[in-house]
Image (cartoon, rainbow, N blue to C red):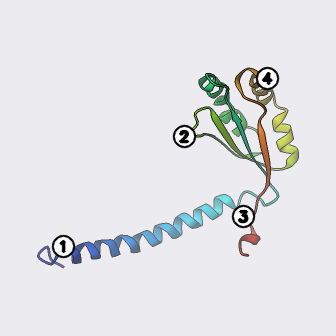
Amino acid sequence: MSWLEPPGALLSAAVATFALAGCGAHAKAHKEANLRYGKIPDTAYAVVADVVAKPGKEAELRKATLPLVMDVRSEPNNRLYFLHEDRNVPGHFVFYEIFRSKADFEAHNATAHVQRWFSRLPELAEGDVSVVHLEILGNGGDAQP
């Protein structure tokens, strides 16, 4: 192909080349993800929790909550822990957590760092933490319908 050919032909060849290269990269990423996710058994215990700051307390609740990330990730039976903040509602925090078992989740809630955080909520948050208890699906052999 030369630079004298119509621009569309060159662009089409470039797109085809990148698409074919991307297929290999996609397959590799998919394989690596399966290895990572495969380490989390279907019997693991997952939760999504959220809490909303009182008006004017958004920064203070954020400051009190951020240390939980490293503390919880260092717990021996925590498998995954993410803290999120709603981009459209500052001060609305959502947690995604996976523990080895329900007993490990309950032990997590009894740790000193979580209890310290819970003790701050009456002054910083509107209401209680809302928690949804989840069963993990599609991570093992049940991925196909």
Tell whether 88 sits left or right of 67. Answer: left
Q: Residue at x 62, y 32 (%)?
A: 91
Which amino acid type corresponds to the residue marked 1 in the rendered image?
A: Pro
Depth check: give the residue in front, 54 or 13: 54
Depth check: give the residue in front, 88 or 131: 88
Alpha-carbon neighbours of circle 1 within 10 Å: few (<14), some, or many (≥20)? few
Q: Position of residue 27 (x, y in %)?
A: 52, 70
Q: Which residue is mark 2?
A: 87
Which amino acid type corresponds to the residue marked 3 in the rendered image?
A: Asn
- Does 1 appear above or below 62? below
Which amino acid type corresponds to the residue marked 4 in the rendered image?
A: Ser
Specify the farthest residue to the front. 55
Q: CA distance from mark 2 to mark 1?
A: 41 Å
Q: Residue at x 78, y 43 (%)?
A: 131
Q: Residue at x 58, y 33 (%)?
A: 90
Of mark 3 and mark 4, the one earlier in the sequence is: 4
Of mark 3 and mark 2, the one earlier in the sequence is: 2
In the rendered image, is residue 137 in sight?
yes
Specify the farthest residue to the right. 103
